Image (spheres, grey):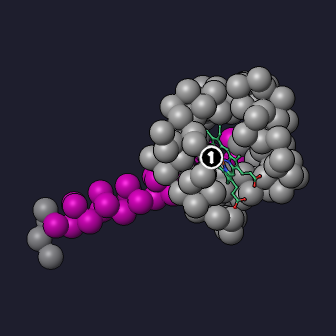
Amino acid sequence: MNAKLLGLLAACLMCAALSARAEATLYAALGERAGIAGLAEDLVGRLKSDSRTKVFFKDTNAKNLAEQLRDQVCAVVGGPCVYEGATMAKSHADLGIGMADYLAVVELLQDAMDAKHLPFSVQNDVLARLAPMYRDIVTR
Ligand code: HEM
């Protein structure tokens, strides 16, 4: 193997190690599974009481939604959880969610993370990982 290829391989390995470390750090920064569970419960309380979002969640079982959110966020931040709920497209398909509704939910998630005194870098990382779901959730 020539030196250039060896250098590239070393860089790749370092990259993989660094990104695995970033994942572990984010999961830890959120307080692992228990911290994420607390965050999800807080968020569901906000979703059910905020004037912009409560209409969507009026018939929702809070405990069940909090558990689904916990598993999903835990998995998305690299934690050892498996999300077994419905896909984002399927669970939001008939809800008629618009951009303003989506932004309201994001704001409530930020409020829930603020309440736990999570640093902005951690908050931004969580939001960045959830952002790609936007296209499956917003349907109008
Ligand atoms: C990044 C944004 C979002 C994420 C990660 C997310 C995640 C989830 C998850 C994991 C579920 C559970 C699915 C299941 O039970 O199988 C769910 C259900 C639901 N979501 Fe979202 N969601 C997001 C945005 C929104 C928005 C913007 C709204 C409306 C304003 C919304 C309204 C709902 C409703 C009404 C349910 C069904 C709850 C029930 O079963 O009664 N979601 N969401």
Q: In the figure, 104 relative to 45: above or below?
A: above
Q: Is residue 11 left or right of residue 130?
A: left
Q: Main secondary structure of the magenta part?
A: helix
Queried whether the magenta region covers residue 91, the answer comes back as: no
| Label 1 Cα neighbours within 10 Å, binned few <14 / some 14-19 / many ≥20 | few
Q: Residue at x 72, y 31 (%)?
A: 53
Residue 88 occupies which quadrant of the picture?
bottom right
Q: Which quarter shows the N terminus?
A: bottom left
Q: Is residue 17 visible?
A: yes
Q: Position of residue 98 (x, y in %)?
A: 53, 34
Queried whether the magenta region covers residue 21, the answer comes back as: yes
Q: Viewer-proximal residue, 19 or 116? A: 116
Assess mark 1: CB under 8 A from ligand 1? yes
Q: Which residue is mark 1?
A: 95
Q: Viewer-proximal residue, 116 or 106? A: 106
Q: Position of residue 16 (x, y in %)?
A: 41, 60
Disc 1 residue type?
Leu
Task: State the extent of the magenta-drawn residues as a range.
Answer: 5-29
Q: Residue at x 77, y 23 (%)?
A: 51
Q: Is residue 131 visible?
A: no
Q: Position of residue 4 (x, y in %)?
A: 13, 62
